[in-house]
Image (cartoon, coloured by chain):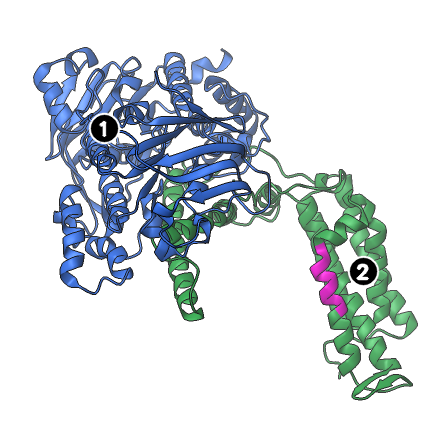
Amino acid sequence: MADHGNTPSAVSISAQGWSWRHAGRKTPAVRDVGLTVAPGERVLLLGASGSGKSTLLHGLAGVLGDEGQGEQHGSLTLDGRPPGEVRGRAGLVLQDPDSQIVLARVGDEVAFGAENQAVPRDQIWQRVRRALDDVGLEVPLDRSTSALSGGQKQRLALAAVLAMQPGLLLLDEPTANLDPAGVLEVRDAVGRVLDRTGATLVVVEHRVAVWADVVDRVVVLAADGGILADGPPGTVLTDASTRARLAAAGVWLPGHQPSVPTQLSSPGEELLTARGLSVARAKRGPAVLDGVDVALTAGSSLGIVGPNGGGKSTLALTLAGLLPARRGQLEAAPALSRGAGSSPHAWKSAQLVTRIGTVFQEPEHQFLTNRVIDELEFGPRRLGGTDEAAVRRRVDPIAERLRLTSLLQANPFTLSGGEKRRLSVATMLATDPDILVLDEPTFGQDANTWAELVALLAELIQDGGSLLAVTHDQEFTDALGSRLLRVADGRADVEVRP
Amino acid sequence: MSVDVLTPHLTGRLLPRANPLSKLFAAVLVTVVVMLSIDWVSAAVVLVSELLLLPLLGISAWQLLKRTWPLVLAAVVAAYGTALLAEKTGAVLLEFGPILFTQDSVNSGIAIGLRGLAIALPGIFLLTTTDPTDLADALAQKLRMPHRFVLGALAGLRLVGLLVDEWRTLGLARHARGVGFEGNPVARLRNFLGQGFGLIVQAIRRATRLAMAMEARGFGAGDRTWARESTFTRLDLWVCLAGVLIAGTAVAAAVWAGTWNFLIGAS
């Protein structure tokens, strides 16, 4: 506890009528926020997607940029000074572990911030060890940063920020991309750090239940500007009228399950069968899973579950006909292949899209055009849909169903996270595949998008579609009545549901 | 599985401990000397010295050959081509239709082949024994190169590894949308360009986020300290000395043998 004394004091936040409009946008990302946070307070920041939570967080971190990058109204200060002037007093942890790691070795990564603050060398290593200790990351200092798991990477990002001894921690959905074990790792590390340093906390997160015990205040941003609710978790999260407004805003509330239809049909005929299947990420390198036996049937859903890094996505991509099987058999039944041959991996992509559609984890990977409408029409037109009316009949109901009608002229890359997810699902549905494969469809989605997605997928299953989802989300597989294929330690076992 | 450009598997025990700058100095010196003259004596001296130092890499000649066979193949092809096309002076060694090898043309061929290998090996010594992070440390601390530039390049190098992964994912994701790598050459080319554009978009987005993460951690604001000091030790003296010795011996031997032909201003 030798260096406890020089841990800087917690930071206070003051926002008065603060608004920020990104350059090139018509409407402000954040509007008219008035907020005072005392030193040491722990705030959970909520709001519908598009209410500007992340922008406010980035503003507090002082990384929004200058006049060239946007326009500011009102004032936003840390300890009475603009955030850009006191950089390092606030430490920011982002959602995607891979885009915030700078260096190749764990020790260097943690030291990076302290180096930038021109901390003397001997003190840097004290801070590095302390920070790694705080987040419970017990790996050698020269361990490669890319060899860490998702949860470890996020704890590393937290340690890297702690080595700067910030008085304010800013966490932007730090657990949205993690498996359940990773979520708890990070949540507990944050709790320990706050208990020791007494720093102020502002965390943005959709899933309230994870953070409810760590924070002592909940602030909800309204979608149309200002603050919707503000108070202790017990009050804000239990008050009936606030709960109703929060639920409408898509916030995940403890004890509130988004309503979804539950009638499901009984499974139909087998479409795709794997026997003794081995899967591997690349042509060379080891197989990640061996001896997988599973069948996809019409009118049913299968969830691939298990810890990250176990080969779930690789298995899904192989079943989807995108990766070649290493060994074993993957056979499409005649009802699915319809004359295209029994091996999905040998299908041409135009044959694939009418049989198996795959929704990737990152929607942007699948965008091909620069308008939402072109994106939706791409598949039907590619299949020879020269008949304008036929394309319209196919695309319009899907756009309507997934609430994309008002966005048809927008550029897909400028949509919000939830809108991108809805669009990527819609583009796959546009070619009417028999099997729909989804990789982590609910990662980072708010409760409203979640419920819409589940309702839509349930409908697909009822209409005889077959669904395969890689997911950590137990509520999701429960709602769809999925069979489960548990992947761990190089094996995949079908789990019998009670 | 991302391709890890920044943490290569370093070989040998001694050379990874040397400062990257001394290795860089020795490698550049030797390479420049070989490039100055096309003669088989200087190239052979350098190549033999390099092969004698090979045990320092801690890998067998066979493993080295497995890793570098394209270079060896290129050297052999270059040697053959030179022997075939160089000035046909001296005694005729082989004549078969249009194919004519003379003593001088074969000498030139051997010189070119040896020279190719002698030039390639110092780079291989440097790459297989140097961690890019250490090189960045040395460049910024010892050569006083701007740290914004050096660390920016290092962070960029890490993104390259991620982008290799991203390229593969993009290919699969586009195949799933109905634009696979198939059809006639024009369609393939169009798809390749489309995927390349997608990769650029992702690279820019990643780089922007990374730049923000670096800025949030105080990068680029004024002076900074270095957690690890880049130091020179006695080992570095030996590395530099070895470079000077190999280069000097090569020049001296070639001049003594009368084969030295200074490339600049020659012919």
Q: In this rendering, would B161 be left or right of B88? A: left
Question: Can you tell which quarter of the image residue B140 is in?
Answer: top right
Say which mark, if any, is on residue B258.
none
Between residue B182 and residue B203, name the one nearer to us.
B182
Residue type, mark 2 in image: Ala
Chain painted blue: A
Q: Is residue A494 visible?
A: yes
Closer to us: mark 2 or mark 1? 1
Say which mark, if any, is on residue A264.
1
Q: Chain of mark 2?
A: B
Q: In this rendering, would A139 be left or right of B130? A: left
Q: Chain of mark 1?
A: A
Where is residue A297 drawn, in percent x and y?
A: 34, 36
Question: Can you tell which quarter of the image residue A255 is in?
Answer: top left
Q: Magenta residues, as a range?
A: B68-76
Looking at the picture, does residue A304 appear above or below residue A70? above
Check disc 1 and report its element: helix, strand or loop: loop
Gap in angstroms between the C-alphas marked 2 and 1: 79 Å
Where is residue A160 drawn, in percent x and y?
A: 45, 29
Which residue has dot 2 on it? B247
Neighbours of disc 2 within 10 Å: few (<14), some (14-19), many (20+) = many
